[in-house]
Amino acid sequence: MSTVKIHTIIVAGGSGSRFGADIPKQYCLLAKRPILIHTIEAMRHALPDAEITLVISSDMQQLWDDLCKTHDFISPTVVYGGATRAQSVANAINSINNPDKDDIVLIHDGARPLVDEPTVKRVVECLISQTSDGVIPAIALTDSIRELDDTGSHPVDRSRYRAVQTPQGFNLIALQKAYQIPERPDWTDDASVMATAGKTKINLVEGSPENIKITNPLDIEIAEAIMRCRQK
């Protein structure tokens, strides 16, 4: 790996309302430990020298402190999120002072606890070795898909599409500048923010089918099954 300084931002400020639990999903248990702890540990394992910033809601600080104490876990530096994911990421990247022009940043979802080391390193290595505005892990679609329009729906060639994952990697200073643009409703991820700033050359690297995002309770069972398979 290169000596370029790597910053990692783990975004976990959401309410997780679709999950349906009493607390945001990232604090729910996966194999007897909070999902967020698994996510942080996965990123620490993949990039032990990277500086991690964790974004959480200020309302969840006490809960997070209690969970860290219960599970004997040392938290990364915490930054409080905003009303939207974009505001949360902006708060985190703007908390990094005086970055070098070559510093890179990885933005990772707190609800993706099964990200593996090869995926993370593919993102970093591609970002360092190739000229691009960003790097995204992605996987091919397995389901047939249809596109909706005013007349109904029609099939599209799924081979031309990819499902996007995280962590997404960028030059830190370039991403900081992109987030100075007023927020737009079409900002679905950090690559779309960069595109608004005119940075559209995004390289794709192979993601992992196991790098699932926990969205509903069934995903917990799926994630635990994946973890059992890994242990074997």
Image (spheres, rainbow, N blue to C red):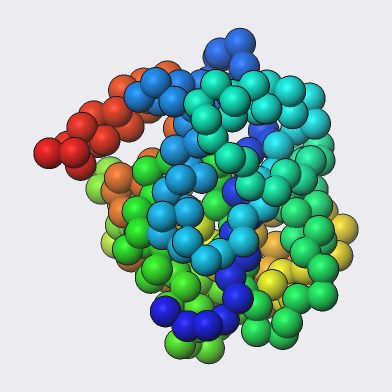
Q: Quadrant of residue 150 in the image? A: top right
Quadrant where the image shows the N terminus: bottom left
Question: Most extreme residue toward the left, as rendered?
Answer: 232
Q: Using the rendered image of the protein, determine whether residue 26 is visible from the camera's viewpoint.
A: no
Q: Is residue 163 above or below residue 68?
A: below
Left or right, residue 222 beside residue 33: left
Q: Nearer the viewer, residue 106 or 219?
A: 106
Q: Is residue 27 above or below residue 103?
A: above
Residue in view at x 56 percent, y 64 percent: 50
Q: Nearer the viewer, residue 6 or 26?
A: 6
Q: Is residue 41 above or below residue 70?
A: below
Question: Most extreme residue toward the top, as rendered?
Answer: 22
Left or right, residue 38 beside residue 232: right
Residue in view at x 52 percent, y 83 percent: 3
Quadrant where the image shows the C terminus: top left
At which x and y percent is residue 31?
35, 24
At which x and y percent is residue 81?
77, 41
- How many marks are shown on the rendered structure? 0
Residue in view at x 26 percent, y 35 percent: 227
At which x and y percent is residue 13?
69, 36
Residue in view at x 77 percent, y 45 percent: 79
Q: Quadrant of residue 57 in the image? A: top right
At which x and y percent is residue 127?
50, 78
Q: Quadrant of residue 214 in the image? A: top left
Q: Using the rendered image of the protein, determine whether residue 159 is visible from the camera's viewpoint.
A: yes
